Image (cartoon, rainbow, N blue to C red):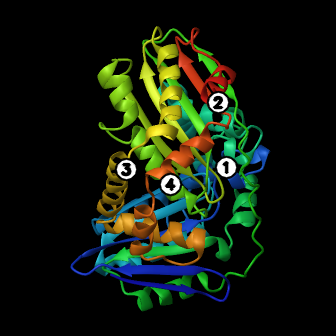
Amino acid sequence: MTTKLNRLPNGFRVVTEFMPGLQSASVGIWVGAGGRHEATEQNGVAHFLEHMAFKGTARRSALQIAEEIEDVGGYINAYTSREVTAYYARVLKEDVPLAVDLIGDIVLNPVFDPREIEIERGVILQEIGQALDTPDDIIFDWLQEAAYPEQPIGRTILGPSERVSAFTEADLRRFTGEHYGPGQMILAAAGAVDHDAILRMAEDAFGHLPAQPQAAAAPGLYQGGEVRQVRDLEQAHLALAFDQPGYRDDAIYTAQVFAGAMGGGMSSRLFQEAREKRGLCYTIFASIGACSDSGLMTIYAGTGGDDVGALAELTIDELRRAAEDMTEVEVARARAQMKSGMLMGLESPSSRAERLARVVAIWDRVPPLAEAIAKIDAVDAPAIRAHAGRLLSTAPTLALYGPVRGAPDAETLRQRLAA
């Protein structure tokens, strides 16, 4: 693999990784403008912009965008997260110039046709409604908001329906004007790519953009809290969150191994204790969700209304026990799962391009995979027990949805955790 990174004079970055033996490539632009960069009145606008990307430019209609990429057998898509909005395509190697031109066009030259805005507004409102009707989706939005109350990082990506219903073309252009500067963009490509050729394409498409100041996002300040929605559903949904490091902190590796040991697979503690031994749930898992400066360990489970209290208490007890007796065997298994998941996930050019953009956004360089592997391998059982011990003095965030009247509150769980 050959990785190269260049920065244009205006701050626009180009990073590529050549993967020998491939006939295709993944190409995309990652913009450092996500949900946490929105002002309160803008909540949901970054996601709205993502939807509008494919609705026409000064050079192409919405149909022409779809036809041009599909005429060559390619694929194009986009997504919005709390820290980035990404526009990316997968094409054969001879069609990389088309992909760069097409993505550059939809990012730089959207027309925001009023009719198309209204069409996408309806689509997004349906998306919001679908999320509200999906308990094991919406509970994570509620959990995030409770963990970071009254903060941009805590707000939903989709935005509230009342804000989405009111966005105008001026709102879309204001956000792009504030956050779509060249210093906030990374062109990442992986697979059958020629770095020098892509760099020339980037210079042609983006080199003329004037540099502009970058507005820093408000820091994420974990506070913890609780949200409880009692509904007559078939299943009770339980989500717990705990303050964890962000990606710029090497402690993230310890946190990820810990989450894997607690709830990363069928052999994990929570799965074995809650499901296999006691039959308290069908689904239970733990994972780390991190931004550049802040993160959460989230534990989710779906259970019956009569069992939600016992399941919550068992989860807290298992976290306490991990601080005392987490074994090297368990930690080694979690390390192996983390490494294999990371390496297997990087066998496609799309995953490689995603990683390139993410690490450049965080560190402004591309750390070799061996560096990440070494940091994972350095996590041992004493480090995990110490990490779990620090968790005992933190305030958990609790989200409950469904028949959850008998579930303990967040303060009760905090006291049990610290006991």
Query: If you read the primary sequence from the N terminus, does the residue marked by circle 4 or circle 1 appear first?
Result: 1
Sequence-wise first label, 4 or 2: 4
Circle 2 — which element?
helix
- Identify which residue, 204 or 315, lies in the foreground: 315
Nearest to the observer: residue 194 or residue 309: 309
Residue that label 4 marks: 254
Query: Which one is in front in this view, the residue at disc 4 or the one at disc 2?
Result: 2
State which tag comes first along the sequence, 2 or 3: 3
Q: Secondary structure at mark 3?
A: helix
Does the residue at mark 4 contact the one at mark 2 (Cβ under 8 Å)? no
Q: Quadrant of the N terminus?
A: bottom left
Q: Residue at x 66, y 89 (%)?
A: 9
Kindly report which numbered mark, 4 or 1, lies closer to the viewer in this rendering: 4
- Residue 278 can be seen in this image: yes
Residue 79 tag number: none
Q: Amino acid at mark 1?
A: Val
Q: Which residue is mark 2?
A: 418
Marks 2, 1: nearer the viewer: 2
Q: Nearer the viewer, mark 3 or mark 4?
A: 3
What is the CA distance from the residue labelled 2 to the residue labelled 3? 24 Å
Residue matched to label 1:
45
- Tell me where residue 165 appears, x and y as whole percent: 68, 37
Q: Are marks 4 and 1 in contact (CB under 8 Å)?
A: no
Left or right: where 218 falls relative to 15: right
**236 relative position to 73: left or right:** right
Say if 374 sits above or below 1 in the image: above
Rendering coords of residue 156 (x, y %): 63, 40
Q: Position of residue 39 (x, y in %)?
A: 78, 50
Disc 3 designates what residue?
A: 328
Q: Is residue 226 left or right of residue 284?
A: right
